Image (cartoon, rainbow, N blue to C red):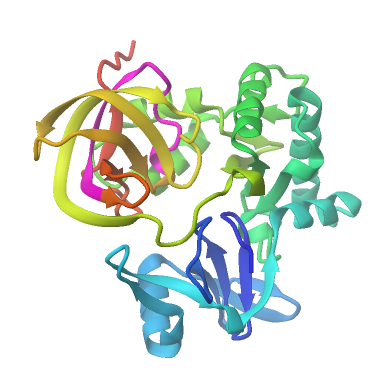
Amino acid sequence: MRARIRDFIHTTDDLFFAVTSYLHPDGRIISFLRYIPDRHGERSLDSARYSKVSSDVAYRFLEDAHPEYLHHYDELGVLMMGVPHDRVEEILRPENRLEEIMESPSDPLLEKAVKIADTLHDAAGIPYRSMGVSGSILPGLYDPENSDIDFVVYGLKNHRRAMEAFGELKDDPSWPLMGLDEELLRRVYSKRIVDDTLSFREFCWYEMRKNNRGRVDGTLFDILAARDWSEIDGHWGDTTYEPHGTITIECTVTDALEAFDNPSRYLVEDVNVIEGPAVEIGEVVSFTHTYAGQAREGERIVARGKLERFTGKSEGYRVVVGTTREAMNEFIKLKDLRLE
């Protein structure tokens, strides 16, 4: 049963999960609970109502009502959510949803999603079959007036081309896709940053150069990366991870092609350990969207997070940023960022 990041799963218990991994253990799809039935919920679908749940609520809900969706994975050393195969009602795929929307966009929000697809197809040459729509639009649990658009580009090189094209056209008033304004930046900042790791000015500088987020007719959208099926290899359990405390390092990024994947991944060299064990580190990864695309090839960065040792086909150490959604006191920053 194939599933990849950005897919959703509708279960036989009428729960909606977002798939969070490319690789899955036998009999289960690694995913995170997003929507639950709730007669007082703020979202509706086919006359039923649902609520979107936070991380804490999701775990508590499953522990109380559906513990079969929780499992401790020894290879990762953590308790995680996952949908057993016998609880899968349907796998919802962003590429199929976009195709459906393009055939008959039924409201202004879906028409905006079509505008994004048409623009990236024309400006960057991205095939329509390599694009999709995820987030609340995928299961149909969106608010036509207030929901954002989680737009997916499949293939890491396709995604880079899409961002480059958007970066070139976002300031051109003749194009429908525009960059972020201060109001939207403050909205995103308030959702993402809960400590003092990044000031608002720093956050804006990083966000404006990433070119993965903008607005279409006033609606916020993200250009999200997902791998083509041909880019997914390996098997669940090939690599195991062991925590070794926290670490702060300074290093140079050598490869950032996977900087917008999930997790974001930066290969690094010339590492100087500022605080923590003196070990050789070859990569920095981020599980929070805040630090996706934070650095480019050749840039010197400072990263703070959890130190992990990985073993399997290869072995070594990595720094993990975003061990919680809020990434408290964890970060990836340019070493010499100077704001004018």
**Is residue 143 in sight in this rendering?**
no
Residue at position x 41%, y 38% in the image? 265
Please indicate whether residue 277 sits to the left or right of residue 4 in the image: left
Residue at position x 22%, y 56% in the image? 242
| Magenta segment | 290-309
Placement of the N terminus among the 4 image quadrants: bottom right
Please indicate whether residue 155 sits to the left or right of residue 208 in the image: right
Q: Looking at the picture, how far across and down is residue 229, in whole percent?
A: 65, 49
Residue 301 on the magenta span = yes
Q: Looking at the picture, how far across and down is residue 166, in whole percent?
A: 65, 25
Report the front residue among 48 and 311: 311
**Is residue 177 in sight in this rendering?**
yes
Report the front residue among 153 and 64: 153
Please indicate whether residue 88 sits to the left or right of residue 19 in the image: right
Residue with the most extreme right position? 103
Q: Looking at the picture, how far across and down is residue 107, in whole percent?
A: 81, 55
Image-quadrant location for residue 305: top left
